Amino acid sequence: MTDPHLHTLLSLTAADALGAATEFKTPEAIRARYGQTLSDYQPGSVFGFAPGEATDDSQMTVATLLGYARGEGPEGVLAALRAWLAAGPPDVGGLTRAALASGTLDGGARAWAGSGFQSAGNGGLMRIAAVWIAGFRGEALARESAIITALTHADPRCVYAGVFLTALLEALHAGQPYREAAGAALRVMDSLDARRTLLDQGIFGLTTRAAHDAFQKQEREARAAIRARVRSGLDGHLTSQSGYVLDTLEAAVAHARADSWLACIEPAVLGGDDSDTVACVVGAIAGARGLEIPAHLLPPLRLGHTWPGWERGWACTEHFPAVVEGARDRG
Ligand SMILES: [Mg+2]
């Protein structure tokens, strides 16, 4: 039996790699080109990823784990994310690039201020499973998820969505039924004072006072919106597969209810738009549920980028165990 954290990392990466072919496409264009099913890696990525190569979502998850292995906490994660970015990956979100440019823990808060406190993309949510994979549990998991999300995405919708997702992974791994696990994760989200956590970490401070105040003003509404979207997803509703964090969260909660790994992932892949990221989040949830990844998806699995600590040609099955162990030992 594969280690559950390693299994979850493989699951989210395989899902991301399946979605790489359909990112930005419409459901109609996807069905015209690939047919009604998409159960194996396909060519056609707009970023030139080869079949079996996973995108920035999985790459940043692995970079976060490589960062924990440095034994320097969030500072080490930030350094590792910057090392990944410096190697010129092909697909980087705008807020992520702006946030990582400064090299300080408050870069995400400053980038959010630079967006006029509007930007709430899914670029923090897509990589936050790394915190659970690194071995954080309980309240420490909730706090760390807030901090690591805010390194690039400091909007309270992004921060609390990240806190919810890792709490959901923990509850599902503990064997709770899906709906109960989501309820437990919402309670974890509601009990965390993320603003205080980000203050304590120095993400909010003198230079990010405006971001702090905006967060404080918006966080009640943000948590209410997440509760509503989670409930909607639990009922099978999804608004869109856009890159807006609440759309991604709702879609992922809806898709990941299915009975098998492929039944969870395939609708995300066929749904197009930000399909790789939606699939990646679904893959994390399916992994924590222990759903079995189709065997044919594992041998070809790669990350589509080379940066310090990772080679593009490396097989994920071969090199992920050391990534997970390294993060767990030092994280
Ligand atoms: Mg991507």
Image: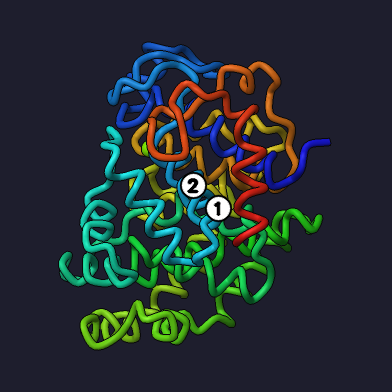
Quarter of the image where the N terminus is located: top right
The amino acid type found where label 2 is placed reads: Thr
Q: Quadrant of residue 175?
A: bottom right
Image position of 49 (left or right of 54): left
Image position of 134 (left or right of 151): right
Q: Tell me the crowding category of disc 2: few under 14, some 14 to 19, or many 20 or more residues within 10 angstroms, Cα based.
A: many
User: Compared with residue 19, is residue 289 higher up or lower down, i.e. above or below?
Assistant: below
Distance, label 1 to label 2, CA atoms, is: 5 Å
Q: Which residue is mark 2?
A: 61
Query: Are discs 1 and 2 less than 8 Å apart at CB?
Result: yes
Q: Quadrant of ligand 1?
A: top left
Is residue 13 among what the camera can see? yes
Which element is circle 2 on?
A: helix
Task: Where is residue 272? Give x, y as percent.
Answer: 38, 31
Task: Where is residue 94? Give x, y as percent.
Answer: 22, 50
On whether ligand 1 comes within 8 Å of the CB at mark 1, the answer is no
Q: Which residue is mark 1?
A: 130
The amino acid type found where label 1 is placed reads: Ala
* Residue at 61% from the left image edge and 36% from the top image edge: 320
